[in-house]
Image: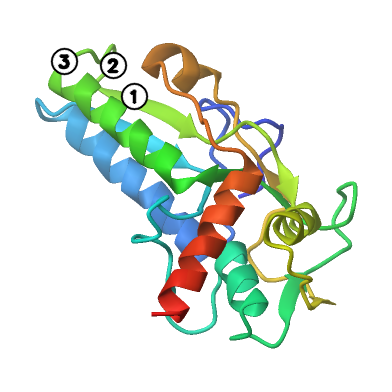
Amino acid sequence: GQAEKMPITEDAPIQTAMSPYGNTKQIGEEIINDVSKVSNINAILLRYFNPIGAHESAEIGELPLGVPQNLVPFITQTAIGIREKLSVYGNNYPTPDGTAIRDYIHVVDLAKAHVVALKRLLNKQNTEKTETFNLGTGTGSSVLEVIHAFEKVSGKKLNYQIVGRREGDVIEAYANTEKANTILGWKTEASLEEALLSAWNWENKIRNK
């Protein structure tokens, strides 16, 4: 759901989910919390923001089935000519440019956080039965900002159109990452531009095999 304050902290009130997908994430956390309370299992909840990009080898990346529901695959498929036009869902949000804002994190940075969290569990370093950490960059980028950043790194002009808002989309969401930075000793390394370029390299590789 739409958080009351930005950036979002781990102890921010849980809002009613605006989509079935959001609800599955809430239910998942509830199950893990319940299990840890009645067992000897310790757990770490990693709250992803918006993972994007691909491995630098361009051997592992994001290939959704059908029309992409996530912004970056939609961008790369439009740039390479698979999609005729990129749909921007709404430009009348109460944000600086009217488009929705998200925290886009390079998937490799996300993967590194998992390694750190697993080591913490294996070394029994938890200070609570269940710990929670935000995984994001701490910076929000609007849909139009992402589009323009992609155009810059790829040299491709995107054909996009503004369409109506999509049901279940929140206005903005970006992370307060202080807890993960301090306790896990983890922070993101890749910039938005680097993440977008890796996604573009991946798209080119899989289409040109």
| Picture coordinates of residue 115, whole percent (x, y) | 27, 32
Residue at (46% x, 80% y) in the render: 207
Q: Quadrant of the C terminus?
A: bottom left
Coordinates of residue 169 in the picture (x, y in percent): 66, 61
Q: Disc 3 on helix, strand or loop?
A: loop
Which image quadrant is residue 32 in?
A: top left
Q: Which residue is mark 3?
A: 124
> Which mark, by number, is residue 29?
none
Q: Can the viewer see residue 16 in this picture? A: no
Q: 140 left or right of 112? A: right
Q: Quadrant of residue 168?
A: bottom right
Residue at the spot x=50%, y=54% of the render?
53
Residue ID for mark 1:
131
Residue 57: in sight, yes or no?
yes
Q: Amino acid at mark 2?
A: Glu
Q: Answer whether labels 2 and 3 touch (C-beta < 8 Å).
A: no
Along the line of sight, the residue nearer the viewer: 36 or 192: 192
